[in-house]
Each structure stands twice: as C-alpha cells, then as structure tokens.
Amino acid sequence: MSAVLQVKNLRVRFRGLSAVKAKLKGIKDPFIDAVRDVSFSIEEGQTFTLVGESGSGKSTLALAVSGLLPAAEGSINFLGDEVTLMNAEEMQSYRRQISFIWQNPVGSLSPRQSVGALISEPYVVHGMKDKDLKAEARRLLTMVGLPAHFAERYPHQLSGGQARRVGVARALALSPRLIIADEPTAGLDVSVQGEILNLLNRLQDELGVSMFVITHNLNIVRHISDRTAIMYLGRFVEQGPTNSIFAQPRHPYTLALLSANPEPNPDANIERTELKGEVPSLMNRPTGCEFHTRCPFVSTDCNSTFPPVVDAGESHTLTCHYPGKHEQT
Amino acid sequence: MSAEQKIDNVLSIRDLSVHYSTNRGELNALRHVNLDVPKGSIVGVVGESGCGKSTLISSIIRLLAENAIVPNGSINFEGSNLLTISEDEMRAIRGQRMSIVFQDPMSTLNPVISIGRQMIDIQYRDKKTKQQKRQRSIEMLASVGIPDPESRLDQYPHEFSGGMQQRISIAMALQAQPSLLIADEPTTALDATLEVQIIHLLKDLQRDMGCSILFISHHLGVIAELCDYVVVMYAGEVVEQGTARDVFHLPAHPYTEKLLKCDPASIAEKSRSLPTIPGEIPDLTSLPSGCVFKNRCDKAMPKCDSVVPEWRESAQGHFVSCHWAKP
C-alpha cells in the first residue's frame, strides 16, 4: 500500500502580536504555533481521523494540508509532489485531487444557487464546462442516495442530513484522491449521523478514496477510521491504528478523552481520568511536557524536559515520559 | 408520576398542544403533551430535530412566537397555570423561580459588558447594596468552579473559554435560586471533556440547591448519565416517559428502541454499516391518521393506521403511547 499524503514535521504559525507591540512588551517571538512538529501519513483508500479539543489546531492542520495556509516548516507530500513548493498552476491541479466536506452543512452551500448548480460548480471552477453538467449533477445525487429531482431544490429546502449529502456529492465531483471532512456529523441527530457515516464508508469502499476526518465525536471514530491521532496544543500526543488506540490508550490525555465519553446506559460505571485546570494559551506554552499542567499522573521531569517519542508497537507512537503509568495505579 | 400527582411536581404539563399558523396551513408543533418534573429531580427530554423540544421550552417560559396558538392544555408550575396568569406575574416567575441555560454561551452573554456587571444587573429585583450583589456574584462564580472569581469578574466574555462561558451562564441562571432550571442542549457546543465537567457541575449544583432541572438534549449518553427521568419526543408528541433505567434498559416504544440502537456510542464493535431509522418525520401540517410513527415502524399493524394510540402506563411509572406496549 502506498501513501497518498505524507506530512513531515509540519509547523504552521500565526502572528500573535504586531511587531511594534512585541518590541514594546519585550517579547522575542510574537508568533504562535498553531500546528507544531506534526508528522503522519494517509494510506491509499484508508481513513485517518484527527481528534482533539476546540482550539487544538485540527482545522489549521487541514487548511495547511490543502495549501490554504502556508507551512512555516516541514513538508507535505501528495503522491510524490511537494505541496509546499507548488506554484499557482500546480496548486490548481493539486486542488482538483483533494476536496473538502465543510463543517456547517447548510452554511457551506450558497443559499442562492440550486443544488444542481452547487454540485456541478467544481467543474466550472476547474474549467471543465464542456461536461454535461446536468447529467453529472444527477449522477452525483444518485451516488449519495438523493433523488435526481433534488437538483432543482435550494439549500433552505433541505434538512440537515440532506444538506450534508449535497456537501458530500460536491466533494465527490472531481473524483478526488483525498477527501478532507471537517466534523462530518456535527449538529446531526443520531439516526442521521449513522446514515452519513454509512454513506462515507460505502463511497470509500466503492471509489477507494482516502479520507482525512476531523472530529471531536469519539463515538464515530471507531466506526470509520483506520488510523487515529490525538492532538493537544498543536502537537500529536499519540497516534496509531484506531483499534490499538481504543483498546489501549497510552497517553494520559487520550485516556482522559476516551473516558470522558458518556455512555447511553444509566448504570454504566465509568472510571474517569479527570483533567485539572484549563487549556494553556498558545502564546505561553508550558515548559517540558506541554500537557503536564493538566496531567493527573504528573511526576518529576515532566515540567522540565520535553518527553521522548515512545514506540508502542504496530506504528503506535506517543510522547510521554511515563507511558501507561495509569495502569500501575 | 401518575395523573393523580402522588409526587410533588414542580412542573406538570397536561394535554398541551401548540399550533403555528403558517401560510402552508396549521402546523401542529406539539400535540397532547403530558410531562411532569418531580421536585428535586432531573428530567431529560430526548428527541431529534423538529420534534418540538424548542416549542416545548418556549411554551413553558411563555415566549412563544406570535403565530402560535395554544388550543388546549395546562402548564402547572408551583400551583399556578402559566397559560392563564398575567404578563406581570409571568415576568416575576422568569429568571426568579424558573430560569434557563441556552445552547450557545457566547450568544447568551453580552460581549460588550463585563461578566460582573451582567451578573449584578440581573439581580435587579433584590434590595441589596451593590457590594452585596457583587459578593453574591463572586460566590456564584466560585460555586461553578471559576478560579480566582474576584478578579475575573471584571473581564469580558471573550476572555473566557467556551466551557467557562457556559459555567458562567449556569451561575447566572442559578443566582436567584430558581426552583426549576431549564437547560437547552447546554453541552452541544462543548468538547467531550468539558461536557462531562458541565454534567457533573449540574448534578452537584442540583444536589446542593435542591432545584429541579429540565434537561433537553439529543445526546443519549449525556441524558443517561445525568437524568433521573427521561421523556422521549417524536414529531411533536411525547411517546414515552419513565425512569432513566426503565427507558434505557426496557424501551417500550419502537422509536425509543431504534433511537438507542442507532447511537454509535452503544455499538462497541467496529462496524462499517451503522443502524439508522429509515424514512422521514411526517409533515406536521398534514398529519397522517393513527400513530405518528407508523411509517417508520417495523411493527406497524392495521390498527396503527387508523387508531391513535393512547397514553397509558405500561409498567409502574413507565408511560408510553403505542398499541404494542403491554397494558
């Protein structure tokens, strides 16, 4: 199996303070690292899921991968081509091979365009007007399980689940190699969630497209993803095969996230790993292990030295001084 | 939880219907709803989008849209019928004996007024000095776990994280020690770890202050963890009501059963094809005859087509409206 996307040591920075303000306050580095030292790869036909709290840098990473944000350091390799070095023309052809499913299903559809126009728009944007757009729209609608007459409808006439399907249809328009889905089930009811996930799974089986899914809903991760990474303050604290992460979370943060998931059983006795405090500011990253301010198993070394990358087998890695410490207590 | 009101109920809704007049005709948003919130308990309302949860809240706090019609029913809150009392009386109840926490904390709080000012302002009814009101605000912030409340009182909403903002809105809602707190999907906009924090906070506050909570959510896990009683709504009707244990372990209505089955959280094994509920919610402007769930129900029989199932007690304290439920 070959990798569709390979990201190495990626860093994305934003300016936090203006040059003058930084000088006045005596701050040497007025930038914040929204994504720092992130490496991962997505295999052909597989789903890679990124989990993390709001503000951990998930969406920034997705935008950087698609070339919508510049990378400060590191490399993004898409099928052998280096994305960070692409010129405008190469970028255009790269964007034809990746597509997005945006978070807000209705908000990402223009209210003044019909569904047919919306889902055939990618062809127009990429100069393929000679295609039979109406036929393409019908083909795409059928693919996502909507009746062909939906092409005449407008976004406000769709339910949340239907709007999401239209979003999926539009993402499929140019037969991309990689689909980036930002919170594909946010705001949907549980029964509709299942429908969308089944649709994504089915399309992946049929078309062999790779997927990069961003979510904070842990319940869905298990069912759709092959590999999972956990992000905290712009870094991956743990990544590995989804089964392995769910069966044996090793990083205390992963443990806390997984155990925070409420179960639909009033008698469930969940052993929780509770986090203390608040997420630190990116302007002021903690020293040593960046998680030590909230870690329930914090110990010596944690606040002074950066933890090493620990190999937990089966390409499952994490950064922690004391991996699996929770198992001893 | 029976009709004779054996238990002391803070809120008790009987046979409530709410219709909206629209240009497509009358939209039956709520139909013959019965609901009880016993004193000192947490009642969860579950249902999908469009099932009438928001209409239910608006009718309890009597802030219904102008095109709403209430043809029948009563909402009994601590001895007064909220549908018949005067606007002044209603105003005295809102925010004082009954308060609400909304879904999005950022739109609850005013972004250009400091937290302290907002918390002091809402105590306008109390005849206390500004200093006392400030002290009370500090106490409330401390009780919802905001560190260093005294100095944070002068900060603005954008200086707090989402979880903290939601805790501040809870503090504001509970400031007047209401007997009923309505929480409208208060954790939907939050991450999993914060969600658990808020649930625990609500549980602790409920225990300390002895208020009742009506908790609206479509997250089944949250409802199971927090609530004592569960009310299941579908297309404007309450289809099932009982203790959380009964509803989650022995769902009596086919809709509840299906809803529980299709929650991805309850499926431990990895599955590429998740269960769903095929079909759509019926059009509320032209309702089908008989049972409202029949077109999506596997167990539908000829009787379901013609006769509306009646609301009855299938087991002790467990109510359901389905022809299949045991008498």
Image (cartoon, coloured by chain):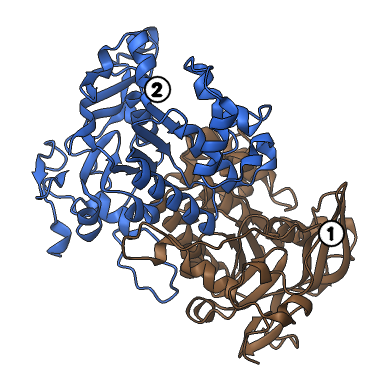
Chain colours: A blue, B brown
Residue tagged 2 = A96
Q: Is residue B204 visible?
A: no
User: For residue B321, which quarter of the picture?
Assistant: bottom right
Q: CA distance from mark 1 to mark 2?
A: 49 Å
The one of B99 and B238 positioned closer to us in this rendering? B238
Query: Can marks 1 and 2 be said to lie on one chain?
Result: no
Q: What numbered label is drawn on residue A173?
A: none
The N terminus of chain B appears in which quarter of the rendering?
Answer: bottom right
Q: Tell me which amino acid carries mark 1.
A: His
**Identity, as a three-letter code, of the amino acid under mark 2:** Arg
- The residue indicated by pointer 1 is B19
Measuring from the top left, give residue B136's x and y in whole percent.
58, 52
Q: Chain of mark 2?
A: A
Left or right of A304? Residue A60 is: right
Specify whether A79 is left or right of B257.
Answer: left
Q: Position of residue B85 (x, y in %)?
A: 89, 64
Q: Is residue A76 above or below residue A295?
A: above
| Image point (28%, 47%), residue name | A294
Q: Element under label 1?
A: strand
Using residue A84 as the reference point, say whether residue B187 is left or right of it.
Answer: right
Inspect this view and state whether residue A194 appears: yes
In the foreground, A13 or A17: A13
